[in-house]
Amino acid sequence: MSDRQGSPGEKDTFSLAMEAESDSGTRRLNIWVQLVQAARKLDDLERLQIWLYALRAIFNPEHLPLSAAERAAIATRDFSAEAAVARRVIQSAEHHAAVLLSIGADSAASRESRVSIPVGAPESLQRLLEVLNDLRVLIDAVCGQRRFPYQTFRAVGRLYAFSLKSCRHVDLILGRKFKPQFDRVEDAVLGGILHRISKDELRQKCALVMLHLYQDLRRLRFLSAGLTGDGPIRHYLALFAMLDDEMGQLRSFIRTEVQRRAGSDVNLQASLDWIRDILEKTALRVRGHELVSVALETSPPAMTVKMAKAHDLLRNCLQGCVLSLAQAFEPSLGWGDLFPPPSEPDLSAHRAQQELYRLRRYIRGLIGGREPAVLGRLMAMLAAFTEMGQEHFADGDWRELEQHSAALLQSRNPRESRELLDGLVRFLDTLAGAGSLIRPAAVGE
């Protein structure tokens, strides 16, 4: 499969989609990024924006890995551990902001790029450093009282979000979702698939979904490098919070901007439904199970293991979403056409997740009257799913699914059958949320 060969200088679908998202501040932003790039400090700019996004997310308890009991008592919970994570993130952001501020108006970078530093850029960075310093001092003062109350934690987060508005050029960086210097996707296979979408609006929206997914995969690689290094890793919880936030934004974008443009394309609608579902279930698995209590973990190896598993769950999920969207237009596409070939257990887990989603969707159709009530077809789908997903079940899950199937076979009363279907779909939803069908690989595979 090959991409269409365009004329020299012709822009690809991804570039056009990014341009459509630009605003009036693009020219000033591009001048600044050009200067940073000439100074070979582009990595610092990218890391600065990642840590600033992460800092915003860590102050929102919605994205924090808390247990059900912790969420129920959130108003009285101590947020000292999360405040310590935020403090470490602030230090990382301060480092990269200071590096960028060191790019002077008479630097070699400025002369090489033949542009002057945009008016206000150094002032914005200086103001950002003041904001970050104030936050750090405030966190230290509250932590000195041996307890960080929920309301204070939220107030510090609101203060941070408000203060960023006074850092004009930094605010421009954070306000523009995609930047060609960081987020360009150069994949001829995907480019060719997107180019063949006849509707301009739908093509652009699908390209933006791909850009979202690849951006998150890029940030996962940044996270992976941190987990395999020698330094502290607890503050990477903020990156997980950021990814949780962005996966939620992507689900909303698909629902409000993409699906209504997909029209009656059954394959595309099913793919988009599955992507939204697996993003939600994986985020819940990571936030509500894998990373719970990691902020309080005292064993570095145990912390690394938990974060590595969460990392791999997210990576497998995001890669699966890319593949699923591409397969809506090119069904013959395989995982190895887009990503390094995974192990057979990984592929098996991905197929089982898709089959689980189709089964849940079919049962909901039965309950809602959108599907004809054919018990034989349901039993065949259950049998196919159990055969495909058998190796991924815990013993208890396997026995419970058998019990649900046996009860449905024995039922002769429509009302009883409806209640049994309700119970079965609740069980399957729990199974999907538990993530037991997602097999994580080792970090760095």
Image: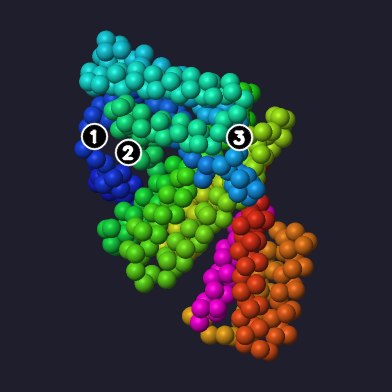
Query: Seen in the image, is 278 located left or right of residue 206?
Result: right
Magenta-highlighted residues: 340-369
Front-lying residue, 133 or 194: 133
Pointer 2: what residue? Answer: 176
Asked if the magenta segment contains residue 345, the reply would be yes
Give residue 283's position: percent from left, percent from top: 55, 50
> Is 314 located above or below residue 355 in the figure?
above
Q: Position of residue 111 (x, y in %)?
A: 25, 14
**Image location of residue 266, percent across then percent down:** 42, 71
Which mark's residue is nearer the viewer, 3 or 1?
Answer: 3
Give x and y (percent) for residue 306.
67, 40
Disc 3 to disc 1, C-alpha distance? 40 Å
The three-letter code of the residue at mark 2 reads: Arg
* Front position in the image: 71 or 11: 71
Q: Earlier in the sequence, mark 3 or mark 1?
A: 1
Q: Name the residue at 53% across, 85% down.
A: 372
Q: Is residue 205 visible?
A: yes
* Residue under label 3: 78
Does the image show residue 46? Answer: no
Per the model, the C-alpha gap separating discs 2 and 1 is 9 Å
Mark 2 vs 1: CB contact within 8 A: yes
**Amino acid found under the numbered disc labelled 1:** Gly
